[in-house]
Image: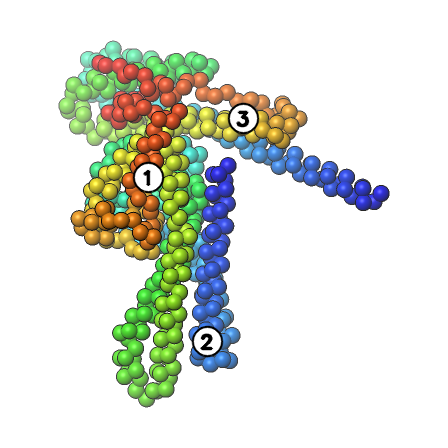
Amino acid sequence: MVALLIVIAALAFLFILTIVYYYNKLVRDRNRVDNAWHQIDVQLKRRYDLIPNLVETVKGYAAHEREVFEKVTEARAMGIKAQTVGEQAQAENAITQALKTLFAVAENYPDLKANQNFLMLQEELAGTESKIAFARQFYNDSVMAYDTDRQRFPGNIVAGMFSGTFTPREYFEIEIAAERAAPKVQF
Amino acid sequence: MTFYEQISRNKWKSALLVSLFIAFVLLLGFFVGYIWGPERAIVGLIIATVVAVTMAITSYYHSDKVALAAAGARPVMREEYPYYVNTVEGLAIAAGLPVPRTYVIDTPAMNAFATGRDPEHAAVAVTTGLLEKCNRLELEGVLAHEMSHIKNYDIRLMSMVVVLVGIVVILSEFMLRMLFFGGGRRRGDGGGDGEGAGVFYLVILLLGLLFLVLSPLIAQLLQLAISRRREFLADANGAMLTRYPEGLASALEKLTREAVPFPRASKATAHLFIVQPFRKAGGEKIHRRSSIWDTHPPVEERIRRLRAMAGMEGMYTQAAMEARLRGEVPG
């Protein structure tokens, strides 16, 4: 009788231990996903901060290319205002297109292309673009790890017990690989 | 999951390395003390314990500094090499790791390595030759390889090897030199205390022989730390990070083709680098057969495996990546 009680107690203890372990694992996964999402925002904000400087620098050499500046500034404002993920993605696309045009225009001004400040801003923007892509990639990787742990046994039981805590996270909308593979726009 | 297995294996091997090292030094201390006089064995043991523990702690906390200093690396700020620092920051985001410290080595040779005890205390170093001759995608490939070493905890093991095995190698070379060149002279210099000098010579002789016997074991220890699988794994994980295996493949090709000698790389640090450093000009090492003494797998094989990854799902196309290289901002 005592032996049986000990066995039952041990099993219960083991059960609780397993739950605690998988609960903590899921918390870690979920926090990483949220942190990764935040990381994308950090890089997007960095890009918003760089754009006015870039516009000012280019204006100094090519003041009459007003149309291009307007497009960039407009797209930036749209991105800052964006509420939903869909709006955000749309604005980011607009910014990307506008910047492409801006850099294409800059090609026509040799003095501008030799400007140290312009070169630095160009490098910073290119670096930030890469970081945005990497941050999205890490976000999707994190969601995948989270999903795997949520769906696999016994994580799925724990996730079911605390379904309010471990809500699903969405993958980043745009399939970046396909986007990169898209034919490039010629100016 | 193999990823986590690799991490725990690396931590386990690091601990094993330290244990072996401490055991070795303790044995040495006991041995030296005993030769001097059996009653002094315990003194030797105590001294050896202090020395071994100090060295083990040093190797854990300071191996990165030793490795960086040995390679002649200096820290760089964003202003000097913005695109290098940006690339490291970007890859740290992709890997979900803190940004490692960035260093450069001023040499036309092309190479890179990572060091540190864990991802929170990591550093990457690249040569200025590599920064000048590699394009952005190639640099990204190289740094992604190094980032994988950081994530895997390869850096802890590999850096500790630099210090601990380095000390043993230096000691062994020192002893052998004493044995062959110093011994005769020292006997003559002995002056009044001829007997003491004789004992000293005997100790050196025996130690030298001991090291001579142990050197294959030391080499074996190096092999343990630098298994070729580690490099293949870092290549593959790096390619997963950039989603573009061709970047690293073409960098490896360039690194081997333009084999510039890198005199600062020594036996103790060679295994750290992304490709085995060349000692002499002309790069005659490339076409020689691979041997068991190689610290790295053959570059051709690494390139072949990377190119085999290129067609995998989720990888970027060459056209898309080249567009990015031309400064066209990707979406």
Residue for point 32% across, 24% down:
B317
Q: Residue furthest bottom?
A: B192
Residue type indicated by callout 3:
Asp
**Residue B33: image tag:** 2
Task: Say which residue appears at 23% left-offset and 53% top-offset.
Answer: B279
Q: Residue at x 14, y 23 (%)?
A: A110
**The residue marked by circle 3 belongs to what chain?**
A
* Secondary structure beneath label 1: helix
Q: Residues within 10 Å of mark 1 (few under 14, many from 20)?
A: many
Name the disc covering residue A33, or none. Answer: none
User: Mark 3 against mark 1, which lies toward the viewer?
Assistant: 1
Question: Disc 1 sits on a residue from what chain?
Answer: B
Number of residues whose C-alpha sits closer than 10 Å to that of mark 3, classed few (under 14), some (14–19) or many (20 or more): many
Task: List x then y, in percent, for residue B184.
Answer: 28, 79
Determine the secondary structure under disc 3: helix
Residue annotated with mark 1: B302
- Name of the residue lying farthest toward the left: A110
Q: Chain of mark 2?
A: B
Q: Are marks 3 and 1 in contact (CB under 8 Å)?
A: no
Q: Amino acid at mark 2?
A: Gly
Kindly identify which residue carries mark 3. A147
- Residue occupying the far right of the picture: A1
Q: Nearer the viewer, mark 2 or mark 1?
A: 1
Q: Secondary structure at mark 2?
A: helix
Q: How many marks?
A: 3
Residue situated in front as seen by the camera: A8 or B326: A8
Q: Position of residue B198 (x, y in %)?
A: 35, 83
Residue B40 seen in this snapshot:
yes
Estimate the spatial distance between the alpha carbons at disc 3 and disc 2, rounded to whole Å. 61 Å
Decide: is A86 above or below B82. above
- Residue A135 placement: quadrant: top left
Q: Residue at x 39, y 55 (%)?
A: B222
